[in-house]
Image (cartoon, rainbow, N blue to C red):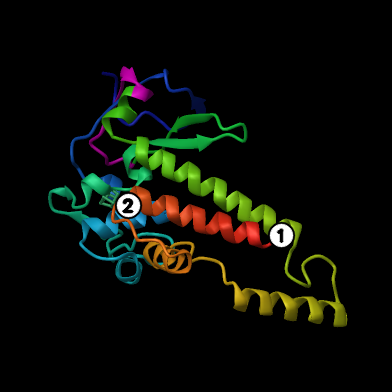
Amino acid sequence: MIGRSLPADPVRRPLDAAFSYACHRCRRCSHDKLIQVNPYEIARLARNRGMGTTAFIEAYLDEQPYLRRGADGACVFLGPEGCTVHPDRPLVCRVYPLGRHVRSDGRVEYSKLDGDPRSAGVFGLDGTIAAYLADQKVEDFARAADRYLAVLQRLYDSWCAAPPAGADGVSGSSAAVVEAQAREDLAEDPPPELLDLDRAVAEHCRRCGLAEPSEVDARMELHLAAIDAWLDRQH
Ligand code: SF4
């Protein structure tokens, strides 16, 4: 072990870089953080609470898509003994105190985050980043994050290719016609819900005459397929 609270540094490290972190359950890491969640994470947390994603979003997200925090800055899921949704905690909580960075070529690197100066956690060099992440059971969550990142990129690219009227220099009566047509198209074929996985999957299965799977990973695949299919129909 080496000393606690090493200063954060911007260096991006590969999976085989030396790293270890010993948590001493001081709970500081769950305060004053914006915990962003994707549809897979929302679905996992919703199942953990025994509810659907629509009700979960209403109950536990503040400014979407961030977990609600209390007046003291604590995450809504922080209890006296620590995280009350530990088996289903989001990716960002699993990789903490590392930051995960996906490069444009798909390579993933990690950096050490600025910890709370009052944290009792101890940084060290006794293992590797890969071993730490395996211990935190990051794999399913990292895969889901990458899949949603790819589909969001596709949505963004689609918007850039055909931006709403007024955003690409179309103006006046031409803009009004294009906008009216776009509104009509969207009313006929609205995009799937992006955050609310249960609602999107229910709609997709109804449209396609499919039975809804119960398992979260299978539901995520259908959600991504629904968004991809909608994007395909836009061209
Ligand atoms: S979900 Fe759990 S680990 Fe993540 S910030 Fe909230 S209490 Fe902490």
Residue 15's x, y, as percent? 43, 23
| Residue placed furthest toward the front | 209
Residue depicted at 47% across the width and 22% down the height: 14
Side of 12 where 17 appears, left or right: left
Judging from the image, what secondary structure is the residue with disc 1 in?
loop
Residue 96 visible to an observer of this rendering: no
The range drawn in magenta is: 116-130
Q: Position of residue 46 (x, y in %)?
A: 28, 60
- Dot label at residue 115: none
Q: Can residue 92 be seen?
A: yes
Q: Residue at x 30, y 53 (%)?
A: 44
**166 or 24, nearer to the observer:** 166
**Label of residue 235 in the image:** 1
Q: Residue lying farthest left?
A: 81
> How far across and how far down the image is residue 151, in percent?
56, 50
The residue nearer to you, when weighing 124 against 199, is: 199
Which label was assigned to residue 216? Answer: 2
